Amino acid sequence: MDENVKAMYQGFFSGLDAVPAKDPELQKKIDDWKRRMEAFAGTITNIADFYPKYIDSGLSEECTTLMTQLYMQDSNTGNAAPASGEKPVISVKNFLEQYRAAYEEIKQAGYRKHTEKAYENIFAVADRTDNLLEAQIILEQERMLWKIVSEDWCDVYEPIIEASDPLFPSYQSLKLVYQSYLACNSEEEMNYHGQRFERQINILTQRELRPWWFALSIALIAADAAGNRSEFWIWYLKNEPEKAKKKATAALMARDTCRRMLQLLKESYGLTYNDLAADKHVKPFLLAAVNLVLRGRYKKALPPAQLDYYAEIINEQIIPDLGDYEFLMQAARSVYYKKYEAADYDDKILRIANENSGHLTYYKYQEALDKKNEAKDGGDKMDEMHGAPFRRVTRNLVHHNPLCGL
């Protein structure tokens, strides 16, 4: 069972145990509620799901009723409110202490500042009223219990967004989810936004991905045309006519395919390869960017001269209406890079990436999880904490870079 969920329901138990039940029947009801509460908690795999499902289950309303009966058990009328001037057995402060165990668990995490504040606002209700009914009204009207959930989203999403690459297609989608969920005041609103997200994010993602897919495809096909042309000359000079012919045919076919894609790009979107290659979101993909740290805030990539190579082949050799022989006679001036192998390059850039990322909350939390051996198979615990809506979003947005194999 998730330790945070366990802390939640044990906090409720502590609140009920604060005052002994004098009526055996009331104690029986409390014990029954505890059994059902523990069984319910066992079905929760995600802390963000706890309060919405807890409220929907009816257990929350039952707990409030039991707490009320406990503090009213010494009153003269049994079920009536305490007489004027008479102090209830359980004060508002004691009633709110049921959230203390969960609060202390949250504080131990060290990074969940928004959630800490949400709990502190709940405790502060005791400073606003001595009337338990009025306190419950405040909790409901100001959606304080719900804010434990929504503020927890802040603590999950903000570090992820901060640690993510703002140029990657998933970044805008993460912000969309985060901002929409912040506006939620109920489980119904959360479910509504969750249903909206799939279509909106698909549209947003496709809009972001389409340019780099076109640019990458055109660039790689152009590079394939140039590469086969180079091999044609190798076999031709070795007096291997069959092999040379095969490479020449492959070079010309790649050239023609690239020209058709350039034409489709122009007709469908009114764009040229140069338009796409100048886009700051596209460049990392053309340079085979590979993440150095989780969430991709720092990457390693091929030298910027790779962009010059693609531009030269496409603009000077693919687009011009050259004859087959004339195309095969062309030679590239720029270098085509497959990987960068400067001495100690990987070690140096990895150290820089870690040094510049270590102060971020996301990585501090990851490090804490590693130390506690709580990370599962290298999984992202922060992603897991947010639950199914977040996992669905990230699953739809994770794309492998075809250039990584170069």
Image (cartoon, rainbow, N blue to C red):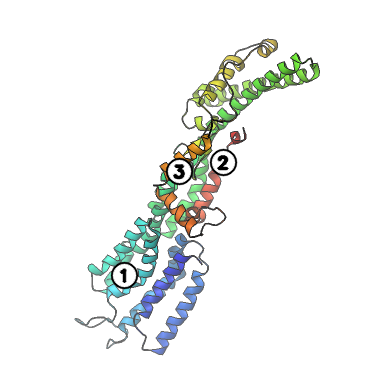
Residue 126 in which image quadrant: bottom left
Q: Secondary structure at mark 2?
A: loop
Question: Could you tell me if the residues under marks 1 and 2 are in contact, i.e. CB atoms within 8 Å?
Answer: no
Instruction: Identify the residue at image location x=56%, y=26%.
Output: 268
Q: Secondary structure at mark 1?
A: helix
Residue type, numbered disc 2 = His
Residue behind mark 3: 354
In this rendering, the answer to whether 3 lies above or below 111 is below
Q: Give the foreground label among 1 and 3.
A: 3
Give the side of residue 130 with respect to residue 13, left or right. Answer: left
Residue 361: x %, y % from top left? 40, 50
Q: Say which label, 1 or 2, has the lower sequence index.
A: 1
Residue type, numbered disc 1 = Gln
Residue behind mark 1: 136
Residue 215 in which image quadrant: top right
Instruction: Report how far apart the C-alphas of labels 1 and 2 lie in the structure.
Output: 47 Å
Residue 134 in which image quadrant: bottom left
Residue behind mark 2: 399
Instruction: Identify the residue at image location x=52%, y=52%.
Output: 391
Give the side of residue 228 with respect to residue 68, left or right. Answer: right
Residue 156: x %, y % from top left? 42, 53
Q: Secondary structure at mark 3?
A: helix
Give the side of residue 36 with respect to residue 232, left or right. Answer: left
Instruction: Report how far apart the C-alphas of labels 1 and 3 lie in the structure.
Output: 47 Å
Residue 189 in view here: yes
